[in-house]
Image: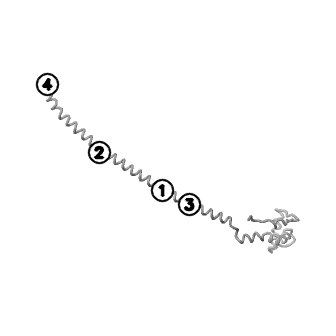
Amino acid sequence: MMAELKEARSKSKMIPFYMEREVELGKRHEAIMVEKHQLLEEIMLYQKQEADERKAYRLETKEAHIRNQSILQDLQIAEDRFKQMERSSPHPTVIHLEEHYWEFVEEELPKWEQFLLGKTSSPFGMKKKQQSRQKCINSQTMHLPKEVKVSTLGSKLKTFPM
C-alpha cells in the first residue's frame, strides 16, 4: 500500500507538469497553424499573380501575332502592287520618248557635230563671250577629235527593255 500511495503522490505531482506541457504545446500548435495559414495565403497570392502574368503574356503575344499578321498582309499587298506595276506597260510618255529618242538624236546630231568641230555657233545660241571662254577651258583640259564618226546603229536600238 505504501508503494501505491507513493505512486499516487508522484502521479499527482506530475499532473501539473503535464498540464503546463499541454498548454505550452497547444500554444506552439496554434502559432504553427497561424504561420501555416499565412504561408498558404502567400502561396495562393503568388499562384494568382503567376496566373495573371501568364494570362497577360498570352494576351500580349496574341495581340503581337495579330499585329504582325496585319503588317505581313500589308507588305504582301504592297509587293503585289509593285509587281503588277512592274508587269504593266510603261507610262505613255515613256513609250513616246523611247520611240522618238533616236529620231531626235539623228535630227540634232548634225548641228552638234558642226558646233563640236568649231565650224558653227552653239545650237542653243550661247553668247560669244561664254563660248570663247569655254573654248579656252576645253583647249587646256581636253582635246576634241577632228572627226567624229557616229554610227547609225543607235537608231535601231531600244533604250528601254519592254
Instruction: Measure the alpha-carbon separation of dots 3 and 2.
Output: 55 Å
Q: 51 or 25: which is nearer to us? A: 51
- As drawn, 44 above or below 79: above
Residue furthest to the left in view is 1
Residue 95, quarter of picture: bottom right
Disc 1 is placed on an element classified as helix
Quarter holding the N terminus? top left
Residue 115: mark: none
Residue 130 visible from this viewpoint: no
Residue under label 3, please give it: 71
- As drawn, 126 above or below 17: below
Q: Where is residue 99 in the image (x, y as percent from the top left)?
A: 77, 70
> Identity of the amino acid at label 4?
Ala
Query: Dot 3, how many residues are within 10 Å of its Cα: few (below 14), some (14-19), or many (20+)?
Result: few
Q: Which of marks 3 and 2 is in front?
A: 3
Residue 34: mark: 2
Which residue corresponds to the image point at 44% horizontal and 55% vertical from the top-left? Answer: 56
Which residue corresponds to the image point at 60% horizontal and 63% vertical from the top-left? Answer: 77
Query: Dot 4, how many residues are within 10 Å of its Cα: few (below 14), some (14-19), or many (20+)?
Result: few
Instruction: Measure the alpha-carbon separation of dots 1 and 2.
Output: 39 Å
Q: Position of residue 78 (x, y in %)?
A: 61, 63
> Identity of the amino acid at label 3?
Ile
Left or right for 64, reference 102: left
Residue 27, quarter of picture: top left
Please report whichever mark, 1 or 2, sits nearer to the chain's N-terminal start.
2
Residue furthest to the top in view is 2
Disc 4 is placed on an element classified as helix
Residue 3: mark: 4
Query: Dot 1, how many residues are within 10 Å of its Cα: few (below 14), some (14-19), or many (20+)?
Result: few
Residue 91 visible from this viewpoint: yes
> Identity of the amino acid at label 2?
Val
Residue under label 1, please give it: 60
